Amino acid sequence: MKHLLSIADLSADEVWQVLNLARELKEEWRKGGNKPILKGKTLGMIFQKPSLRTRVSFEMAMIHLGGQALYLSPDEIKLGVRESVPDIARVLSRYVDGIMARVFAHSDIQELAAYSRVPVINGLSDYNHPCQALSDLFTVWEKREKLKDLKLAYVGDGNNVATSLLFAATKVGMDLALASPEGYELSNDVVKLGQEFAAQSGSKIELVRDPAAAVRGADVIYTDVWVSMGQEEETERRLKDFPPYQVNAALVAQAKSDVIVMHCLPAHRGQEITDEVADGPSSVLFDQAENRVHAQKAIVALLMS
Ligand code: CP
Ligand code: NVA
């Protein structure tokens, strides 16, 4: 691993390397703290969009490993506006030992990586969210002690989070059912890539319209917001199209009785997920949020130590 831009670029072995190291580092942390394997190292964090989890979990991951993180707000950097993306990559990578960036256009993170001397980590782009999905695999593995042959049902928008989940699941042999409204499905290119990985790992991919069909027999139900960052002008249309895709108690009741419910957060409670489900016995939302720290410790350790 040189950069982490998409899970599509990782082998199944590399995915497992992240998960195994995340488990080791979480255990070490629980026993009193991590060894300072990133002492003296700094992660520069560029944000074009807001964040709670990604910002704080990366910052804490660096601190726990003896390093530090530098937050660069949307107003400071003005990626591609105040200065070109290649020049920002050239300059910043002379100061820091790794760059994490949250961007709009995926091509911006690809360009940062192309011109950076240090590893670049994708902290969400309009295309995908690899740190989230690696961390989510870790959460499912922790809860179920396996990944292969489990079924994850994703209900909602075929967005950046869904894209990374498809890649992550099909790398490790998890089955995946996706239910999205017409016009909001994953792109054909993404599905094609997922099918290639599934052919290697034995995952089954189901693309359905009906959320109830997706969750039938599911071990995990996953949802995300109906309006992602950057899509605010589509809010009215999306709020009309998505209500049948709400993850509520009636939908959860159609999955396995021990199903776990996941959401990358932030949640728009009352839209894609009800309070009853988000705060109910199946929800693992906050373990999932915590695990961002543990999974990202593994990512920065593998890329930067
Ligand atoms: N899930 C996630 O990436 O959250 P933030 O947008 O708060 O970073
Ligand atoms: N799909 C959401 C994920 C937020 C973590 C967005 O892009 O806004």
Image (cartoon, helix red, strand yellow):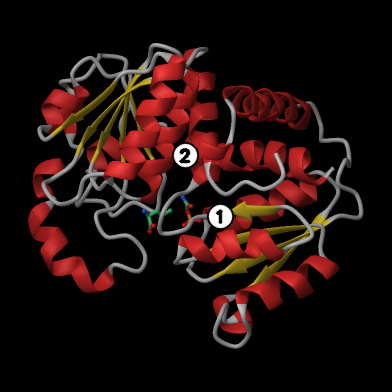
Q: Is mark 1 within 8 Å of ligand 1?
A: yes
10 Å crowding of disc 2: few (<14), some (14-19), many (20+): some
Q: Quadrant of residue 105?
A: bottom left
Q: Callout 1, which amino acid?
A: Gly
Q: Is residue 213 left or right of residue 15?
A: left
**What percent of the width, then of the height, locates residue 140?**
47, 24
**Image height of 118 relative to 282, above or below:** below
Which quadrant, please, contains the N terminus?
top right
Q: Is residue 292 left or right of residue 44?
A: left
Task: Evaluate whether residue 84 shows in this view.
Answer: yes
Q: Residue at x 43, y 41 (%)?
A: 164
10 Å crowding of disc 1: few (<14), some (14-19), many (20+): many
Residue nearest the viewer, comparing 80 with 63: 80
Q: Residue at x 28, y 46 (%)?
A: 187
Which quadrant, please, contains the C terminus?
top right
Residue 286 numbered mark, or none: 2
**What percent of the width, then of the height, locates residue 163?**
38, 42
Q: Residue at x 28, y 55 (%)?
A: 268
Residue nearest the viewer, comparing 8 with 36: 8
Q: Callout 2, which amino acid?
A: Phe
Q: Is residue 209 left or right of residue 82?
A: left
Task: Evaluate whether residue 279 shows in this view.
Answer: no
Residue nearest the viewer, comparing 303 with 247: 303
**What percent of the width, then of the height, locates residue 216?**
18, 18
Residue 123 numbered mark, or none: 1
Secondary element at tag 2: helix
